[in-house]
Image: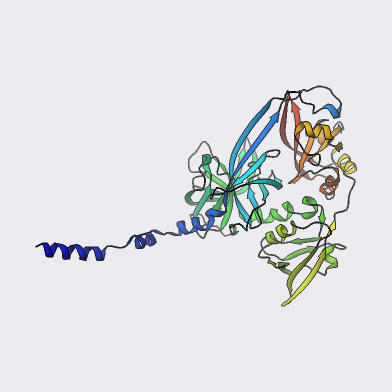
Amino acid sequence: MLAVLISLSLLLGQDRPSALDTRAARRTPVVEAYEKARDAVVNITASESIQVSRWGALPMEEMFNLPRRPVTTQRTSIGSGFVIHEDGYVVTNAHVAAQGADLEVSFADGSKYAAEIVARDAARDLAVLKIDARQPLRTIPLGRSDDLMVGETTLAIGNPVGMQNTVTTGIVSALHRDLDFNGRVMYGDVIQTDAGINPGNSGGPLLNILGELIGVNTAIRTDAQNIGFAIPVDQLKKLLPDLLDLEKVRRTRVGVRVDAAEPRVVQVRADTPAARAGLSTGDVLESIGSRPIRSGADFYMGMLEHKPGDEVELTFARDGKTLTARLHLEAAPKLDGRELALRLYGIRVDALSEKAARQLGWSRNEGVVLTEVEPNSPASQAGLQPGDLLYTLGPYRVRGLEQIGSLLEEVQSGSRAEVGVVRMFRQKARLLEGELVAR
């Protein structure tokens, strides 16, 4: 009898699947998509210190004076983001990357980096950050959103209420939604999903079942359950060439525009380094130096590592042949930013004084001060006031008087631009955002 029981026990043990077998059987496409993307998802912490200051009808130089013992208010918020390029470029929501805040990006392995804003578009709620990574980073591949199907599986990865690298699943609930708040459309043509999106998920990736980016999580309906929204990845692709424009971000003249999705040249401006190097519309870029170019984003982010005076070697394909172009980068021409600001918006601007910058804890190369606002001008109608510190214009940081000219060079009458200002209000420094319409 004992022998029979032993034999039966051995027989049952042979039929029982191993732990490895059961784990493999449980490995679903959702698990695989998450594992592909998790190391590229980041937590973003934005910390702001707002100092108390006296307010009064003081000269511009004294407008930002602070008491001898200023009172500091600390405000911290969290959000999510994801790595779009191995060199340390991170995409998130504009409202996560608060202007004027100290930004910190952290990964699931515990590594943390200080981040700077490369560009930020408040109207589309997208921003690009840069960190100095110690090694090439894992990235999330860009998918497409023009062929999404209602009902297909979605994954949202982020940091809801600070719980890092949380994944939720759902489906595409609807497409082409417009989000309106108080009767005003804030975000247009967004993806609706029932994947769990909570505070802290903002800026994180929405993925398809292949682990490809299909959207950037941006908003939830607080008065409903399982209703979240994401900015389609195709909108991000279209916006990247403008967000990463070298002339506006780094004041480096190149003269070429590349499709964000594929590295195809779509425009070459005359009498620029790109034109002189022989690039033409339709050329497909293959590498910068020894680094391959797989997308237009690779090109723009690779070029951001260079400065005026650098020689950059580009390899490209044309008519079935592989060719090489050598671009000698130039400094963007200096334009009269004061004159353009006055003509377009009715504001006189000046550099931030060293004293005021020190008291604000601000760099002198961050922003310009409004010294005069014309009555009934676009700036006056937008509510800007003398003494305001203008620190963003459109998607770009204002980095002093030299750069503001290049930001305003192509502004047309009637065009709209989101602006960010610092203003002293009720004895506190406030960060305000609004919109200017060029006259």
Q: Is residue 346 visible?
A: no
The quadrant holding residue 367 is top right
> Is 178 left, or right, of 276 in this rendering?
left
Question: Would residue 179 appear left or right of 376 to someone viewing this image?
Answer: left
Note whether 429 is above or below 319 in the view shown. Answer: above
Where residue 238 appears, x then y in whole percent?
Answer: 68, 55
Q: Is residue 320 above or below residue 230?
A: below
Q: Is residue 65 among what the camera can see?
A: yes
In this rendering, the answer to whether 263 lies above or below 39 is: below
Rendered image quadrant of residue 61: top right
Q: Where the N terminus falls, by quadrant?
A: bottom left
Looking at the picture, how far across and down is residue 5, in whole percent?
A: 14, 62
Question: In percent of the image, x 53 and y 50: which residue is there?
Answer: 109
Q: Nearer the viewer, residue 413 or 287?
A: 287
Q: Please name whichever residue, 92 or 330, is drawn nearer the observer in this view of the structure.
A: 330
Q: Position of residue 115 (x, y in %)?
A: 67, 46
For the point 72% across and 66% down, which residue is it? 264
Q: Quadrant of the C terminus?
A: top right
Residue at image coords 81%, 32% = 356
Q: Position of residue 279 (x, y in %)?
A: 80, 68
- Say which residue appears at 47% left-offset and 50% top-offset: 170
Indicate how the structure is coloured in the image: rainbow
**Residue projecting furthest to the left:** 1
